Amino acid sequence: MAAALNLGRMTLPSSKFLSRPSHLLSVKMQMQMQMQFSSPTLTKMSTDAQSVASKLDSSGLLRTQGLIGGKWSDAYDGKTIKVYNPATGESIVDVACMGGRETNDAISAAYDAYGSWSKITAAERSKFLRKWFDLLMVHKEELAQLITLEQGKPLKESIGEINYGAAFIEFSAEEAKRIYGDIIPSPLSDRRLFVLKQPVGVVGAITPWNFPLAMITRKVGPALACGCTVVIKPSELTPLTALAAAELSIQAGIPAGVVNVVMGDAPDIGNSLLASPQVRKITFTGSTAVGKKLMAGSADTVKKVSLELGGNAPCIVFDDADLDVAVKGTIAAKFRNSGQTCVCANRIIVQEGIYDKFANALCDAIQNMKVGDGFSEGVVQGPLINEAAVKKVESLIHDATSKGAKVILGGKRHSLGFTFYEPTVISDVDSEMRISREEAFGPVAPLLRFKTEEDAIRIANDTNAGLGSYVFTNSIQRSWRVAEALEYGLVGINEGVISTEVAPFGGVKESGLGREGSKYGLDEYLEMKYVCLRNMNKE
Ligand code: NAP
């Protein structure tokens, strides 16, 4: 059943806005509030958001229930949770708030479906995935609007995310047919040795809010290609895109139980996935703290684990860099999605000879960036996801300035209010300030200064994280040297946006385990089985 919407053109009373930091409340508190003030489904939205929601509703893509064994389902106790538009604070719709019981049923459905999905031919799985990709493309605009509505990023970036996210499904459809085993030359003449690649089994996929589609397709595409079935748990902040993508998986003919979605009480859902011996793999994208919990929790049933966790990306600008290229690349690496990506440049480390020129050019370019609602024309920076995100940025800037850093652009909440924050540049940052040690996840570019190449590498590697990194230089020799010395899973040289479905994405150190995308990404969903066949004599 698609969402039943009340599209009355009411503006929210101010008390509603006061209650808005509900993103900060625990799921439990939100559920209690739901029970006290429960209304079946509600939507009181601005005209823009209304028309988007209304269009999505009529195309059947605005789903509010979880998907278990091919059936849309409410939470068993009827609880719901609100999804908000971060640009306005308005609630979009109520969705099912599920927990352990629904998750256990989703696992059973995935387990039952695994028997047949893993047995059909790779070519058949490939066709289903291709059809799903085609549908994602057909509905590109609506899905992009849904991302902007629940996540806040500018519409152009949302369309980019659909292209990027869908590409993992297309790539997986192609790679499904190329999962080869091996024959090993035998050390004994009467034996033959083989390696079979087989699917891991049921996969629990837990994803964050910052890329509501791509973080799901990067996992589900290769999982399905290999013959696995999945239980997806999207973030409670952005479940609508996940549900729309799941609806399209059904329309693509992917059999019931192969794709399941549950959302709501994250620890309860997570614990059910961890406890189940039927779940053979956990794939997670999110914070390092939660990733560590999931890794520890997987030990009891010895599950295969892949983790895409937080970053602390250095962006090194050498004296010999092309200034224009370095500024454009830094802006792309820093301000995409309002600074809310795991590979966003977190420390801009600039050589002393170009430092002032670079700082000025960066500020000049950034002050023209239009901030606003992601649906508005020309906007390149939307809101932050919630009040907690703004408070974190404020506290990091406060810590840095109290220790000698200077705000040279921005540095405060935007006049638009809510969770809009001014694109910010701060200079004279050093490695000991919190902003250099923690992921800011906001539109603030801290500038650090260095003298020599060795200094730059030392500063860049001085962190537990090791995901994205960037280098701007015109020297080929230096490019190689620095790329090899950086303790990171990804290095962009003279380029600020490097993620693609054809290349392996992932981190080292505490940024994670395993890789997503590319031919290597499929290995995460496969087990190798060695078979030794004895006696080659004729029967
Ligand atoms: P998060 O708080 O760790 O949440 C990620 C997911 O885990 C959400 O679905 C969340 O559910 C769920 N979750 C939270 N606690 C859980 C628990 N105890 N058991 C099971 N699941 C649990 O991270 P986030 O704030 O959404 O995302 C931002 C972080 O993700 C940043 O650190 C960023 O760097 C990282 N990230 C990494 C990559 C990468 O590829 N390496 C990509 C994107 C983002 P609820 O939201 O419903 O609470």
Image (tube, rainbow, N blue to C red):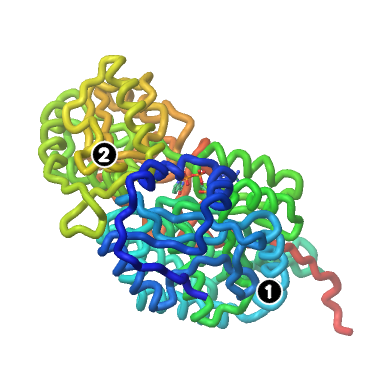
Residue 15 locus on image (x, y percent): 37, 44
* Mark 2 residue element: loop
Q: Nearer the viewer, residue 116 or 519?
A: 116
- Amino acid at pointer 2: Tyr
**Alpha-carbon distance for marks 2 and 1?**
46 Å
Residue type, mark 1 in image: Ala
Determine the residue positioned at 84% across, 70% down: 534
Q: Residue at x 59, y 57 (%)?
A: 79
Image side of residue 429 versus residue 130, left or right: left
Q: Looking at the image, which residue is at 38% across and 19% down? A: 432
Mark seen at residue 339 = none
Residue that appears at 29% across and 69% down: 51
Q: Disc 1 on helix, strand or loop?
A: helix
* Residue reaching furthest to the top: 403
Screen quadrant of the C terminus: bottom right
Q: Residues within 10 Å of mark 1 (few under 14, many from 20)?
A: many
**Whether residue 385 can be seen here:** no
What x and y, as percent, mark residue 359? 15, 31
Q: Residues within 10 Å of mark 2 (few under 14, many from 20)?
A: many
- Residue carrying label 2: 421
What is the quadrant of residue 201 in the picture?
Answer: bottom right
CB atoms of marks 2 and 1 within 8 Å: no
Q: Nearer the viewer, residue 13 or 327?
A: 13
Q: How many marks?
A: 2
Q: Does any atom of ligand 1 lie closer than 8 Å to the CB of label 2?
A: no
507 vs 134: above or below: above
Q: Nearer the viewer, mark 2 or mark 1?
A: 2
From the image, tell me which residue sits under label 1.
Answer: 113
Position in image of residue 27 (x %, y %): 56, 46
| Residue 368 visible in rendering | yes
Residue closer to the observer: 115 or 253? 253
